[in-house]
Amino acid sequence: MRKLLLFCLFFPASFLANTNVAGHCLAVDLGWTTEGIVNQGIGWGILLDLSFSPHLYARLRHGVVETDKAIVGKRVGNYVSSLLVGYRPWGDSRAWFSGIYIATGFGYDQVITADPVSGAVADHFLLPFADFSLGYRFLIGRVVIEPYVSILLPFVEPERSKTGIAMYTRHVDLEGISIGILF
């Protein structure tokens, strides 16, 4: 997974610029920060959009949420990655309002629980999920601001995932904002 993330971060921007499609975006995903705070911890995220046409794009998302759940009595680490395909009905105009978008895809949540004192791993598993996202894109020059809502629905019975970020529900709702740059 680290190799994939490094590849996505250091993929040559000149190759992407030669595709004649404006709108590739690298952004900080603050939805994972709010998810961390809600779950009594911290979080961060990053995303990369690669446009194939003015209307279609692929999105790679990665987020990390680290929590000390008093209710569980364990330290919980969630390492979430997903790949989505998105659609922008109005294309990728360079106006202030670039429009609404919808995206769907799949991903997984690697959940690692550990004893908070000794650090011994208590549980380690993957939780695959479907990812549905709806958002709004604003452009200020080359700066992208996207408020969004995402719903992550697990493919497996979430009973085993009760130590992760899906502790109280059968799905995870992410409400956040992404801030990035176009290239």
Image (tube, rainbow, N blue to C red):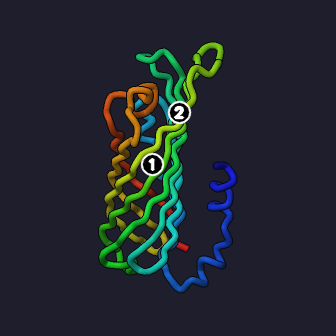
Q: CA distance from mark 2 to mark 1?
A: 20 Å
**Is there any visible trace of residue 147 in the rendered image?**
yes
In the rendered image, the vertical position of residue 5 relative to residue 136, given as above or below: above
Question: Which callout, 2 or 1, points at the residue further toward the start of the chain?
Answer: 1
In the rendered image, residue 62, in percent from the top left (x then y), is placed at 53, 50
Q: Amino acid at mark 1?
A: Leu
In this view, the mark in front (2 or 1)? 2
Look at 37% across and 62% down and name the residue there: 103
- Considering the numbered disc 2 on the image, is that residue within a helix, a strand or a loop? strand
Pick whichever, 175 or 123, lies toward us.
Answer: 123
Q: Secondary structure at mark 1?
A: loop
User: Quick check: marks 2 and 1 in contact, CB under 8 Å?
Assistant: no
Looking at the rendering, which quadrant does residue 178 occupy? bottom left
Residue 69 has which mark?
Answer: none
Residue at numbered disc 2 = 111
For image coordinates 62% across by 61% down, the residue present is 8
> Foreground: 116 or 111?
111
> What quarter of the picture does the C terminus occupy?
bottom right
The residue at the point 38 percent across, 49 percent down is 176
Does the rendering let one see residue 40? no
Residue type pointed to by label 2:
Val
Give coordinates of residue 77: x percent, y percent.
54, 32
Taking the spot 50% from the left edge, 40% from the top edge, the residue there is 109
Q: Nearer the viewer, residue 139 or 25?
A: 25
User: Is 43 above or below relative to 15?
Assistant: above
Crowd class of label 2 (few under 14; some 14 to 19; many from 20; radius 10 Å): many
Question: x, y (%) of residue 84?
Answer: 44, 60
- Compared across the picture, whether 181 is left or right of 10 comes to left
Residue 148, x across and y down, in percent: 34, 55
**Residue pointed to by mark 1:** 30
